[in-house]
Image (cartoon, coloured by chain):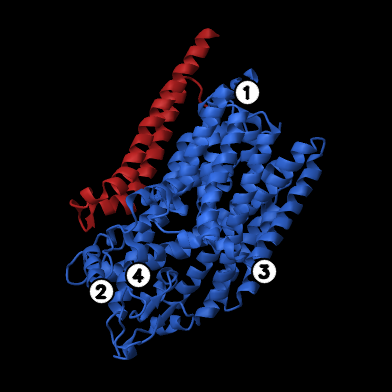
Amino acid sequence: MEILTWTYILVGLSFALYIGIAIYTRASSTKEFYTAGGGVSPLANGMATAADWMSAASFISMAGIIAFSGYDGSVYLMGWTGGYVLLALLLAPYLRKFGKFTVPDFVGDRYYSNKAKVVAVFCALFISFTYVAGQMRGVGIVFSRYLEVDINTGVIIGMAIVFFYAVLGGMKGITYTQVAQYCVLIFAFMVPAIFVSMQLTGNVIPQLGLGGTVEGGEYLLDKLDGVLGDLGFEEYTSGRKPIADIFAITLALMVGTAGLPHVIVRFFTVPRVKDARLSAGYALVFIAILYTTAPAVAAFGIYNAIDTVAGKSVDQLPEWISNWQKTNLITVEDKNRDGIVDYTPYSDTNELNIDKDIMVLAAPEIAKLPNWVVGLVAAGGMAAALSTAAGLLLVISTSVSRDLFRTFVPSMTEKTELIIARVSAAGSVMIAGYFGVNPPGFVAEVVAFAFGLAAASFFPVIIMGIFSTRMNKEGAIAGMISGLIATLGYIIFFKFISPELNTADNWWFGISPEGFGSIGMAINFIVCYVVSKATPPPPQNVQDMIQEIRIPRGAGSAHDH
Amino acid sequence: MENQKQRMKDYWRRNIKIVLSLIAVWFIVSFGFGILLVDQLNVFRLGGFKLGFWFAQQGSIFTFVILIFIYVVKMNRLDEEFDVNEK
C-alpha cells in the first residue's frame, strides 16, 4: 500500500481511539473536569504526564537539533528530564497534600492573598498561551506534512479533535487519551530507532548502539567526530557554546519544567502523596525511554546523511533524498558544478541543506522500513502534539473558571462553574487555533522562553511556600513580579528591541536569553527573601497549613473547599 | 502534644536530609559531570563513549530516574517509621 494510505489508516484509527476514550470518560463534575476525580493510578498518571510533557518538538525536532549541535544538544536532554527530579522531591508530594486544583490555588491560599493569586493566574495564562500557540502550529505542520493538506486545514482538524476531548472530557478525558497517546508515540519513535540501530551498529538497543561500532569496527561517535572534523565542522562530542551558557540554559529548562503549570497539575490527579512521588518516577521512566533514544537517533541520522550523501555524486543519491527533496526539507544544489555534493560549514560552498526534522521523519525510509512505519511515525507525531496542546488548554480553562470566576464569584454553583470551564476551554481552543493559523512572528521565538518565565515566576514562590514558614505574601508578590519582569525584559530586549546586539559579548555574564530564566529565578529568590524579612510574617493559620502539607497522612482526594 | 510537635520536627529534618543528599547527586551528575567537568571526564572512556559526553547525553538521565525511585523508597520507609503514612 502507498505511504499516504497507510498514514490515513493509522492516523484515523488513532483519532477514533482518542475520541472513543473521550466519550467513555467524559467529566460530570468540576472535580473530574479539573483533576479527573483524583483517582488516577500512579502508572497511568506517569504515562499521561509523559505524553503531556513531550510535545511535537520533543518527538520530531529534538533529535535533529542534537544531530546538528552535538554535545550542546545535551542542554535539552538534561534540562527536560532533570526537572522531574526537582518536581518529585520538592513540589509534587506537597502540592498533592495541599490538595487543591491549580497552581494559583496554592499561591492564593499559601500567600493568603487574592492579589498573589491573580499574579499567579496571569503567569499561568501567559506561559500556557505562548506554549499552546506553538503547539497548534506544530499540529498544523505535522498534519500538512503527512496528510498532504495545507497547514491551516491541519490546524483546524487538530482544533476539532482537541476541542472534542478537552471540552467534553476535561482532565478525566485528557488523562486517558494521553495514556493512549503515549503508547502510540513511544511505539512510533522506537520502531524506526531500533531498526536503524540494528542496521548501523548491529545493536538492537539504540542506547547501546550509540556507543557501538560501525562497519570497519570503529566506534560510531569517534568516526562521527573524525568525519565532521574532516569536513571542517566541530567535533560531535565537544561543546561549542560557552560553559556558563550551557549551565544557565540547562538550569532554566530544568527549573522551568518543574514550574510549568500543566505538568504540576497532573500530580493533583493521583489519590495519595506517595502516589504523587511514585508517579513522578514513572513519568520520568516513560520520558527517559524517548530522551535516551533521541541522542542515538540524532547520531545515527547525521552519520547516515553524511555517509550516504556528502562527497557523493549528485546523480547517485539514495532514493530517500529525492523523496524528501520534494518537501524542501532537504536541498541539494551543486553550486560549483563538479557533480559532487559538498557538505561544508560555510554557506557559500555548502551544497547540502538538511532540515532538523528529517532525522525523525525520514528515519523509516533511510532504514528501508515498510510504508506502514511511516504512517506510524505520523500518528506518533500527532499524538505528541495533540496531547501537549490538550494539557495546556485545560490549564487555561481551569485558570479562568476556577482561579478567576470562582475567586471573585464564590456563590457560583458547581454546575455553572463546569459550564464556564467548558466555555473557556472552547474559547481557548479557538484562540490557540487562531494563533496556529496566523502565527504572530514572535510565537515561535517566545515558546522556547515559556520555560524561562516559568522558572523565574512560579518555581521560587512554590519552593519558598513549602520550605519556609516565614515567607509572606509581600515577598511572594514582589518576587514573582521582579523575576518575571527581569526575564521578560532581557528576552524582549535581545530578541525584539535590539536583536543585532544578541551576541555573547553583550550578554550579562555570557548568558543568552534562553538561559536567562535561571538568573530571573535567582532574582526572584533574592527579592522574595529580602522583602519578606522587612514585612510581617504570615498569620498563624497559614503557618499551621504549611506544617500540615509537610506530612503525608490525611491527603484524601483533591477537595473543593 | 509537645512530643508530637517534636516528632514532626524530626520527621521534617530527616526528610530534608534525604532530599538534600539526592539533590546533591542530581547536581553532581548533570551540572558537575555533564557540564563543568565534561572536558576532564572526556579523557576517560566508557566503551564507545567519551565519559563526559555519556554523562551529558545518557548517564545523567539514567541517574535521575534512579534518584526518584530511591526517594520513593526512602520516603515510604520514613513515613512508616514516623507513622504518618497513608493507608
Chain A colour in the picture: blue
Label 3 to label 1: alpha-carbon separation: 46 Å
For disc 2, the neighbor class at 10 Å (few under 14, some 14 to 19, many from 20) is some
Kindly identify the residue that appears in the image at 29 percent across and 49 percent down. Answer: B55
User: Label 4 belongs to which residue?
Assistant: A301
Q: How far across and how far down the image is residue A320, in percent? A: 40, 81
Which is nearer the N-term, disc 4 or disc 3? 3
Which is nearer the N-term, disc 1 or disc 4? 4
Q: Are marks 1 and 4 in contact (CB under 8 Å)?
A: no
Label 2 to label 4: alpha-carbon separation: 17 Å
Residue sitting nearer the eye, A56 or A237:
A237
Q: Write down which chain is painted red.
A: B
Q: Are marks 3 and 2 in contact (CB under 8 Å)?
A: no
Disc 3 and disc 1 on one polypeptide chain: yes
Amino acid type at mark 1: Val
User: Label 3 belongs to which residue?
Assistant: A156
User: Label 2 belongs to which residue?
Assistant: A231
User: Label 1 belongs to which residue?
Assistant: A542
Label 1 to label 2: alpha-carbon separation: 63 Å
Q: Quadrant of residue A23?
A: bottom right
Label 4 to label 3: alpha-carbon separation: 32 Å
Q: Are marks 2 and 4 in contact (CB under 8 Å)?
A: no
Q: How far across and how far down the image is residue A122, in percent? A: 65, 45
Residue sitting nearer the eye, A472 or A174:
A472
Amino acid type at mark 3: Ile
Q: Secondary structure at mark 3?
A: helix
On screen, residue A257 versus residue A402, left or right, reads: left
Amino acid type at mark 4: Gly
